[in-house]
Image: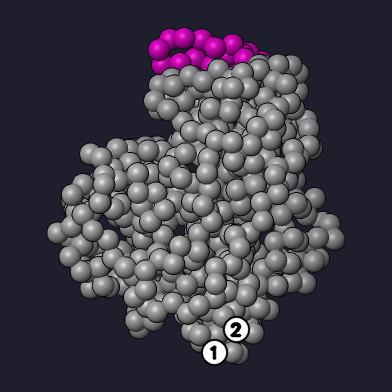
Amino acid sequence: MRTVTGPTDHVVVVGAGLSGLACALHLLGAGRRVTVVERDAGPGGRAGRVRLGGYQVDTGPTVLTMPHLADEAFAAVGDSLDHHVELVALHPAYRAAFADGTSLDVHTGGEAMEAEVRRFAGPTEAAGYRRLRDWLQRLYRAQIRRFIDTNFDSPLPLLHPDLARLAALGGFGRLDHQIGRFLSDARLRRVFSFQALYAGVAPARALAAYAVIAYMDTVAGVWFPKGGMHALPRAMAAAAADAGAHLRWSAEVSTLERSADRVRAVHLASGERIPCDAVVLSCELSAAHRLLGRAPRRPVRLRHAPSAVILHAGTDRTWPGLAHHTLSFGAAWERTFDELTRSGALMSDPSLLITRPTAHDATLAPPGRHLHYVLAPCPNTTVGPAAATWRDLGPRYRDSLVDELERRGLDGFAGSIEEELLVTPLDWTAQGHAAGSPFSVSHTFAQTGPFRPRNLVRGLDNVVLAGCGTTPGVGVPTVLISGKLAAARVTGSSERHPARTRPAPAAAPPTPTAAGADDPS
């Protein structure tokens, strides 16, 4: 593994998102002096927090899987995630609601999910689910150490027996086809393949290896941090400060001072100069390229994942059919992905993620009130409407989403809203996200593993990248790994700090849940 050369005593980490904070904790654990500079007034990056009246709104991810990866970062400094954050295992992990009026609770416990699939689609599909679950587990084991949690210097490390194991499992086939080997019910196939959207590729074109995301969502377990997802970066920042990190808020980096092939100091917009031995850029990939003065030359231009419109709504009521996370699928499927990734049209029959964090933490809203987060995928600004178009398009699209929610059973949603925040590709662009997408560079084959933008910067001996734009990719688990991998580039150590073993959530009782039942948690 190639590493930063020369002294690395003092490292400046640019950006206090999840990857930057994970990197800082691993660096501190390896004995480095660390300064974290963040342009915002506090930690979080994408996993930020906004207050709307008495509502506390998470502005980024709402689904937490693989929390042991956060435990690893805390363990690097002798701390633990549980010391800072109370995690609640979600039962169900999701509720899937379909256009035909049926619904399915997605349990991460094998027995509970098998019983639910049997109720929903019969014994043949239940047996197929069991085989699928086994396949997902084997697929994860074949990938995690060799292809995900690893630093690549070239494609050569792929030539390993694990590559043959992955091929034998069908990992280089198409995701939709491989899921279809186990499940014939089209509704069930969606539950285990919609995750391809996170990778920015339609299930019919995505590599089956990306089913590892479905493993995280549907097998390994889904948790909710009390206080919302923002509690995680807030806790990581506190642990870093306790371990000696110097945290600088509202500190925007303007330039990197270079001498020969090294960065010698980081200059802030305020005029302050911070000398350093090494730099980790965990900011947006496009922002990192601006600071570096260039982007790496690639044979094909980077492609970005679809974007999203998010409606944050503080309401005076909620609806009993909603679980903590509800996947509301439209009837369309292949057409939806074509609109998002090829034609650039808004979803004509949308599939939505609705998150209700107040289901497990009422303090995020005023007494008797509720918080709903509605995510509607949309084309990025390269494929679809330009960022400026959303200035007028956004309010109209918001109204169409509210109408669609009411048609799908959330009667009175429009009238229930007391506070709201609409986020569109215009806002993502203003925050510096390339192509107006918060999901960064898509996971096509040519942008995955050793072919993804490298985290070691060519031509500079002491600069490393971290975050979703570099290896291993997009999502909370992978950006936590990204921070660890970036730290290893600095320290030369790939030591894994043992985190507390956290079993998958115990299965809730496998009692059938009717379509209109309340969240059983």
Crowding at dot 1, Cα within 10 Å, few <14 / some 14-19 / many 20+, comes out as some
**On screen, 302 above or below 238?**
below
Q: Is mark 2 on a helix, strand or loop?
A: helix
Residue drawn at (39%, 49%), measured in percent from left and top? Answer: 361
Which one is in front, 180 or 369?
369
Q: Kindly indicate whether the residue at mark 2 contacts the one at mark 1 (C-beta within 8 angstroms).
A: yes
Amino acid of disc 1: Gly
What residue would you read off at disc 1?
122
- Quadrant containing the N terminus is top right
Residue 426 lies left or right of residue 87; in this view the side is left
Q: What stretch is highlighted in magenta?
A: 255-276
Amino acid tagged 2: Ala
Q: Can residue 315 be seen in this view?
A: yes
Nearest to the observer: residue 404 or residue 359: 359
Residue found at x 21% / y 47%: 419
Crowd tier of the residue under label 2, counting other residues whose Cα lies within 10 Å: few below 14, some 14–19, many 20 or above: many
The reply, left or right, for residue 104 in relation to residue 424 is right
The secondary structure that dominates the magenta segment is: strand
Q: Which residue is drawn at 78% across and 32% down?
A: 493
Q: How far apart are marks 1 and 2 (CA)?
A: 6 Å
Query: Most extreme residue toward the left, as rendered?
Result: 415
Q: Between residues 412 and 396, which one lies in front from this camera angle? A: 412
Residue 220 magenta-drawn?
A: no
Residue that carries the numbered disc 2 in the rendered image: 126
When the figure is inspected, residue 178 is found, relative to residue 125, above or below; the finding is: above
The x, y position of residue 428, in whole percent, is 36, 43
Please tell me whether residue 3 is drawn above or below residue 444 in the rendered image: above
Q: Which mark is on residue 251? A: none
